[in-house]
Image (tube, rainbow, N blue to C red):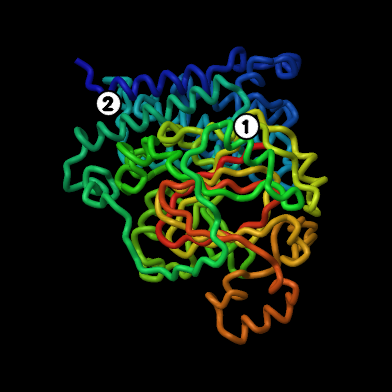
Amino acid sequence: MASASSIHRDKLIEVCLGVFCQIKNISHPSSEKLESDENFVARGGDDLSLCGKPIIQLLMRQSDAIRSHKGDFELIMQRLDDLVALANEKFYAFPFKDVPSCWRALFRHASFLKFSALAVRGSWEGRDQSHLTPLFDSETMDQMVKIMDTALIMAGPPSSHMIQEAINCCWDLLQEIYLQLVEEDEPASKRRKTDPAIYGKQNSFPAKPSFVPPISNPISRIAQPTFDAFEKRISNPRDLNLGPEPIIITGAIESWPARNSRSWKNPSYLLSKTIGGRRLVPIEVGRSYVDDGWGQKIVPFKQFIEEFILLDPKSSGHEGTGYLAQHNLFAQISSLRQDITIPDYCYTSPPPPHHSSPLAKKHSEVLQLEDPLLNAWFGPAGTISPLHTDPYHNILAQVVGRKYVRLYAPRESERVYARGMEDGGVDMGNTSATDIGVLAGWDGNEAESREAHEKFPLFRDADYMDCILEEGECLYIPTGWWHYVRSLSVSFSVSFWFN
C-alpha cells in the first residue's frame, strides 16, 4: 500500500507534467506553429512570442525533455538557468513597472520547468527505475521552494487562472510532503531546528522593553460599529473642512483564527504554514526606507524569523532592522489568508479624497478597486514607516503586538514638507522629508532635533492625532491622511486598502 507521502509526491509530479510541462506539438514546431500556438501562450497568460522564436524553441525543448525524463539533466537545468538569467537582465533594462510582460512570462515558465525537473529527477532516465516516485529530501525541497517563490516574487503571479491553481496545489502538496518527511523519512536527530516538530517550544515571540511615545492627542475608540454606522460616520464628518477622521475600532477582528486557534503570536505555527519556514519573503533591512543604508533582500521565512524576530539583530550579525513590509503575503501564502477575513467596512462607499489635500486630484484618478488590497507588515520592535500618505482609505488591523501611530490631516500637508520628485525621477511626493522621531526628541540627539526644527520651521505648528494601536484593534485611516507608524513590540499587522 502506497504511503501518504508517495501519494502526494505522485500528485505533485502529475501537476508538474500535466500543467507546467504539458505543451502540445512542440517537439519540432514550425514557424507558423510558434506564431499561432495559443495553447502555449494561454497557459502562461502572456505573449512569450515577443521573446523571439529561438528562445521559445529552447524553452520547448527543455519542456519536452522533462516530460520524457530523458537527456542530460544537469545540462537541461543549466539551459533553464540561462533563460531565467536572460529574463532577469531585462528586469534591469527597464523601470520595473515597464518590463515587457513576455520577459516576466519567460522568467516564470523557465522557473516552472526547473521546479518540474526537480520533481521528476528521481525517475530520470539512467537512474533507478524500480519506481517512478522520486525521493524528496530537505535539500531538494529547499531548491523547489526557492525556485517557485523567486519566480512569483520577481516576475509576479501568472494571469492564467489554471497556472495559479496549479501553483496553489503544488504548495499544498509540498506542505503535506514536508510534514510526512518530518514524521516518516527523517529521524528526529536530523530534523532542522526550525521544523515545527522541534520548534514547538517556541510558542510566543520575545517580549523586549521598548520606548513608548507619550500620547498627546488621542484618537477616539468605538466598539465594533455596524456597517451603516461606520459608513455614516466617514460620509458625514463633524468638520467639513477636515473631512473624515481616523477612528480606532475595537472588537472587529476577535473572531479571526489568526487571533485564536491559528494564532499568529505563535512562531511555530507561522513556520508550519511556510513549509518549515522555507517559503521566501521580501524584507526591508534598515530603520526606514528613507534612511541611508536601507536595502531590500529576499530570504527564507525561517531566516527572517530567527535572525530578525527571535534574536537580537546585533547578535545575529545584522546591524539593521528586518521588516516584512507592504507585501501581499496572502496571495503568496494562501494558507495564511484563511486565518483572516476582510472587514465589512472595506465595502462601504467612502468619500472621495478631501479637497484640502494637494494630492486630491492625483488620488481621485486612482482606479476603483474591485476588492480591497491586502498587505502584511511583520517585524520586531523598532520598525518605522516614515510619515507618508496613501491614495486609498485604509483599515489597519493589529493582529499581533502594538504600534504607535501619529496622523496629520491633509490640510497640514504644507507643514509636513513632502519630499517631491527626487534623483532618478522617483516621485516621493507621498512621503514627508521630516523624521518624526528626531523632531519629537525620541531618536537622535538634542543637536539633531534642534537642527531638524530649524530645517522644518512650520512643522511645530502642524496639528496631529496619535494613539497606541493595541493588539486586536483596527485603525481607520482616511485617504490622504499623513501617518507615521512605529512598532513597540514584535508586530504583525494587515492593511486593507479600499476606495
Where does residue 251 sit, x and y in percent of width and height?
42, 41
Q: Residue at x 74, y 35 (%)?
A: 367
Left or right of 264: which side holds 457?
right
- Residue 64 on image: x %, y %: 53, 21
Above or below, 469 relative to 417: above
* x and y percentages locating residue 414 in the rendered image: 78, 64
Residue 439 screen position, x and y as percent: 62, 75
- Could you tell me which secondary element the residue under label 1 belongs to? loop
Report the number of numbered marks: 2
Which quadrant of the rendered structure holds the N terminus? top left
Indicate which label's residue lies in the foreground, 1 or 2.
Answer: 1
Kind of residue sitting beneath label 2: Ser
**Residue placed under numbered mark 1 in the picture:** 348
Quarter of the figure with residue 434? bottom right
Q: Earlier in the sequence, mark 1 or mark 2?
A: 2
Choose between 160 and 481: the one closer to the eye: 481
Closer to the camera, 146 or 17? 146
What's the mark number on residue 5? Answer: 2
Q: Secondary structure at mark 2?
A: helix
Q: Quadrant of residue 312?
A: bottom left
Amino acid carrying label 1: it is Thr
Which part of the image, by quadrant, shows the C terminus? Answer: top right
